[in-house]
Image (cartoon, rainbow, N blue to C red):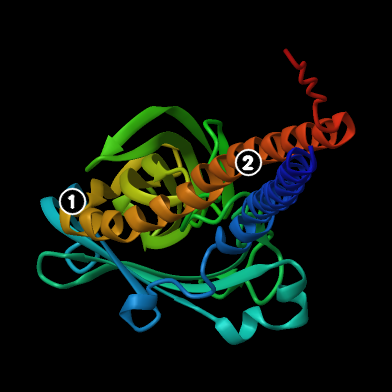
Amino acid sequence: MTKAKSRLEGGAEMAKVFSIICVGLGALLIVLAAMLKFYAVPALAKAPLSPGQSNGGVSITHQAGVAAKLFDPTTLKERTDVPLMVTRYTKGDVAGSQAPDAKSGDYAIWDSFSRVEDNQGVIVTASTERYAFNRVTSEIANCCGGNVDGDEVTFSGIVPLKFPMFTQAQDYPYFDSSTKKPMNMAYSGPDTIDGVATYKFVGTVEATQIGVLEVPGDLVGSPDPAYSAPRFYSLRLTLQVEPTTGAILLGSAEQLQTLRGPDGADHVTLIQGTITSTPDDVQATVDVVKPQVALLGLLNAVVPIAGLVLGLILLAVGILLAFVGRRKAARGPSTVNLAKE
């Protein structure tokens, strides 16, 4: 009887120990899963303070295409079927992002320069932009010296260099540096590039005046020797965005710029063409994005879910062991009656 009681007490004690271990491990896994989901991922899922960290802190992107029409200011005539190359250099102002007004809004500050060249190396257009934007939502802020071509702008919409982290299947206001206003980028469905899931967005800018250009009057049907011709711009933009990181993998822009005369009609086509991200540029972006998507997917979903499920199982096992142990301890050893013959 003493031995039976001793074994029973030992079993109850062992169940108690395992119960404590299971409950402790279960609680720890649940806490770690929550910390990954709500602390680690938000800390990691942000735009870098400076893009192109593997390239000396400078991001270089390329687009190529053809201008069906391109105005030559030296001859005052239109050229046709002119190959174009667009190069954009973007660098982060890391020091500026540490200033109080930027740090309080969790802003990255990126300076960007782009140029469009023809097949003879002649620069067709060039522009500079400086954006301060939230590292998670990509919303542009009106601070930190933001400008377009040196001009102060009242910014709104998301930065035209990347979409928000965890981009949603919805429309977004997307800042257009030519009109200096946001355009609507409408969600048009899912797609894939080299096995990477993307969201496709399409936006248009109807003919909008973006300035004036002094030209000979007869060029635009004016009787005056010189005429300040309104410069009109329209755009159809298609983007494919990797939704986890908000990275733009592929962009294609159909642009038209014209000069209008006194009669309100278009008389000169400054540029009419389409440019698209080069295959090498797309592949380079995909190669950078793929491991980021895998890591964030692991930390944001797989590991927290696995930790939560395993934690709940261990908690249940621990509680069950505690219940069994208490029952054994309360019941005591069974009484055995021996009858003599």
Q: CA distance from mark 1 to mark 2?
A: 50 Å
Above-or-below relation of 21 to 315: below
Above-or-below relation of 88 to 243: below
Task: From the viewer's side, name the closer residue of 137 and 221.
Answer: 137
Disc 2 residue type (three-letter): Leu
Task: Give the residue pinned by disc 1.
Answer: 65
Query: Which residue corresponds to the image point at 67% horizontal and 52% vertical from the top-left?
Result: 25
Q: Is residue 202 left or right of residue 44?
A: left
- Residue 33 at x, y percent in the picture: 63, 49
- Residue 194 at x, y percent in the picture: 22, 43
| Secondary structure beneath label 1 | strand
Task: Give the residue pinned by disc 2.
Answer: 308
- Residue 44 at x, y percent in the picture: 56, 62
Query: Which residue corresponds to the image point at 76% horizontal and 20% vertical from the top-left?
Result: 338
- Labels 1 and 2 touching (C-beta < 8 A): no
Q: Is residue 286 left or right of residue 103?
A: left
User: How would you rate the neighbour count of disc 2 (Cα within 10 Å): few for under 14, some for 14-19, many for 20 or more?
Assistant: many
Query: Which residue corresponds to the image point at 32% horizontal and 61% vertical from the top-left?
Result: 288
- Residue 42 at x, y percent in the picture: 63, 57
